Image (cartoon, rainbow, N blue to C red):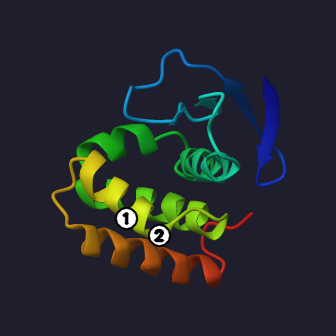
């Protein structure tokens, strides 16, 4: 168990565990709490910290919006995957995972375009802190 901070002051508790995480994922975000499998890579922690930023940025409304809107789910996952790609994970693998695991109805190439578009936004400062 460890503490990380987003936006320099907002706390996020990181717990390494195999419990409570859906089988198809290596990590799971509960806003100010991140669950990571013990074998999860450092780049995935950056992905999950991005979701914590999104939760704080939306004043904890992200969870409801995420489940109700495919458009916002894609936007937020693309942003998190762009951060994960920037941290060293494979764009091809991330694009495939995004296309196949979030009920978005998009192709791998559309997922890749979304991640690259988010990465361009990050380069301009969007989501950074």
Instruction: Identify the residue at the far left of this view.
Output: 105
CB contact under 8 Å: marks 1 and 2: yes
Query: Which residue appears at 35% of the width and 38% of the height?
Result: 64
Query: Which residue appears at 55% of the width and 52% of the height?
Result: 54
Tell me residue 34's x, y (percent): 62, 32
Instruction: Identify the residue at the far top of this view.
Output: 19
Q: Nearer the viewer, residue 22 or 41?
A: 41
Image quadrant in which you'd find residue 39: top right
Looking at the image, residue 55 lies above or below residue 105: above
Q: Nearer the viewer, residue 28 or 87?
A: 87
Instruction: Decide if residue 105 is on the left or right side of residue 95.
Output: left
Query: What element does badge 2 sit on?
Result: helix
Looking at the image, residue 112 lies above or below residue 79: below
Image quadrant in which you'd find residue 114: bottom left
Disc 1/disc 2 C-alpha distance (Å): 6 Å
Tell me residue 56's x, y (percent): 61, 46
Q: Which residue position is annotated with label 1? A: 95
Instruction: Decide if residue 82 is on the left or right side of residue 56.
Output: left
Query: What element does badge 1 sit on?
Result: helix
Tell me residue 123's x, y (percent): 63, 82
Query: Which residue appears at 35% of the width and 46% of the height?
Result: 66
Label 2 neighbour load within 10 Å: few <14, some 14-19, many 20+? some
Instruction: Decide if residue 93 is on the left or right side of residue 13.
Output: left
Label 1 neighbour load within 10 Å: few <14, some 14-19, many 20+? many
Q: Nearer the viewer, residue 51 or 20?
A: 20
Look at the image and tell me in which quarter the C terminus lies.
Answer: bottom right
Q: Which residue position is annotated with label 2? A: 91
Image quadrant in which you'd find residue 124: bottom right
Query: Which residue appears at 81% of the width and 29% of the height?
Result: 2
Looking at the image, residue 36 lies above or below residue 47: above
Tell me residue 113's x, y (percent): 35, 78
């Amino acid at each position: 168990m460890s503490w990380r901070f987003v936006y320099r002051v907002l706390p996020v508790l990181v717990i390494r565990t195999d419990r409570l995480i859906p089988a198809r994922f290596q990590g799971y975000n509960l806003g100010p709490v991140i669950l990571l499998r013990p074998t999860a890579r450092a780049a995935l922690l950056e992905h999950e910290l991005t979701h914590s930023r999104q939760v704080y940025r939306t004043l904890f409304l992200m969870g409801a919006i995420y489940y109700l809107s495919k458009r916002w789910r894609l936007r937020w996952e693309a942003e998190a995957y762009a951060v994960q790609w920037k941290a060293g994970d494979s764009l091809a693998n991330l694009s495939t995972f995004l296309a196949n695991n979030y009920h978005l109805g998009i192709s791998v190439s559309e997922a890749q375009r979304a991640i690259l578009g988010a990465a361009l936004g990050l380069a301009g400062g969007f989501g950074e802190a």
